[in-house]
Image (cartoon, rainbow, N blue to C red):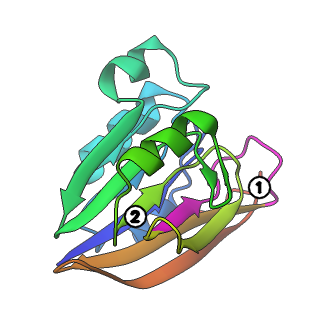
Amino acid sequence: MKKIGLLSDTHAFLDARIFEYFAECDEVWHAGDFGSMDVLERLRGFKPLRGVYGNIDGAQIRAEMPLDLRFFCEDVPVLMTHIGGYPGRYNPRVRQLLQDDPPRNGLFICGHSHILKAIPDKQLGFLHLNPGACGNEGWHQVKTLMRFVLDAGAIRDLQVIELGQRGRNVF
């Protein structure tokens, strides 16, 4: 069993409460747009980190993180990328990846849109997650994160965490 903390679109800002909400997590996953190496290094120093680079990330982050990441965690297949879309409206590049090799009974994770989503893709057989955005840049109004548990091939206990209004820093 592993507890996962999922975030995206930090855009060079880490709300201190992320560390409180993810304190009991075994791993932190970041779905792109770190925005700075400082964010990447602070998360990496906190918990084991898996992630992908986003469209705003520069060469240094792109050298550290891949465009796409496929792995298994607790027997759950995972595919993560930054710009992915959602069921019925996938990015064309990602649509091909998903059709060729979907993470069946697993997770497809992306960021980019700043819109929190948890949608089953019944046609391809996985759960799509987008944790929204937890940075202060972008058009989202509320900063959001997700937590969940992976256990023996199952995804359970999905939680959405609201950090409050974008631009407000409550420590």
- The residue segment tinted magenta is 127-141
**Amino acid marked by disc 1:** Arg
Magenta: main secondary structure: loop
Q: Nearer the viewer, residue 49 or 71?
A: 71
Q: Is residue 126 magenta?
A: no
Q: Nearer the viewer, residue 28 or 107?
A: 107
Image coordinates of residue 118 in percent, x first then y, are: 58, 72
Name the secondary structure under disc 1: loop
Q: What label does residue 166 carry, if any? A: 1
| x 34%, y 35%: residue | 41
**Drawn side of residue 7 relative to residue 154, left or right:** right
Looking at the image, is mark 2 or mark 1 earlier in the sequence? 2
Image coordinates of residue 72 in percent, x first then y, are: 20, 58
Q: Which residue is tagged 2?
A: 107
Image coordinates of residue 117 in percent, x first then y, are: 64, 67
Mark nearest the camera among 2 and 1 is 2
- Alpha-carbon span between mark 2 and mark 1: 27 Å
**Amino acid marked by disc 2:** Leu
- Residue extending farthest to the top is 59
**Drawn side of residue 50 relative to residue 129, left or right:** left
| x 34%, y 17%: residue | 63
Label 1 Cα crowd, 10 Å radius (few <14 / some 14-19 / many 20+): some
